[in-house]
Image: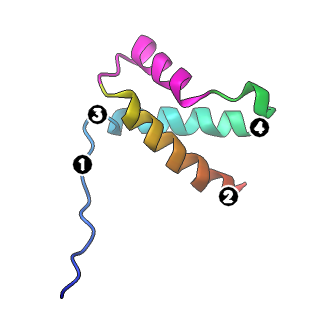
Amino acid sequence: MFCKEKQTRVSPVMGPVKPIIDKWIKEDLKKKKKYHRTAKKMFQQLKKFHSFKGAYRTVRDYVSKRKKELREDY
């Protein structure tokens, strides 16, 4: 068997909002846990203020992955 290289995908939906979500997560890490935004809240804010067209599941998966990565840095 041979091993395929991991495919990198372009994310046209998430690309523009990734910096926004990262900023929110970093802000939340400085606050008490009670005041952290949930992925659902982030999704609602993206739809309302940034005319986000993607799915909740996409946001939730990205938020989960980034929180783990950013917690390691702090």
Q: Measuring 33% from the left and 39% from the top, which residue is drawn there?
A: 15
Indicate the amino acid at tag 1. Answer: Val
Which residue lies under the disc numbered 4? 30
Q: Measuring 47% from the left and 17% from the top, which residue is drawn there?
A: 44
The image shows residue 4, relative to residue 18, as above or below, that is below
Is 74 a magenta residue? no
| Spatial separation of the CA atoms under disc 3 and disc 1 | 9 Å
Indicate the amino acid at tag 2. Answer: Asp
Which residue lies under the disc numbered 2? 73
Determine whether, in the image, residue 12 is placed left or right of residue 27. Answer: left
Residue 71: image x %, image y %?
Answer: 67, 52
- Secondary structure of residue under mark 3: loop
Q: Measuring 67% from the left and 59% from the top, which residue is drawn there?
A: 72
CB under 8 Å between discs 4 and 3: no
How many numbered marks are there?
4
Which residue lies under the disc numbered 1? 10
Sequence order check: which comes first, mark 2 or mark 4?
Answer: 4
CB under 8 Å between discs 3 and 1: no
Which residue lies under the disc numbered 3? 13
- Secondary structure of residue under mark 4: loop
Q: Quadrant of the N terminus?
A: bottom left
| Spatial separation of the CA atoms under disc 1 and disc 2 | 25 Å
- Secondary structure of residue under mark 2: helix
Sequence order check: which comes first, mark 4 or mark 1?
Answer: 1
| Spatial separation of the CA atoms under disc 4 and disc 1 | 31 Å
Type of secondary structure dominating the magenta stretch: helix
Indicate the amino acid at tag 3. Answer: Val
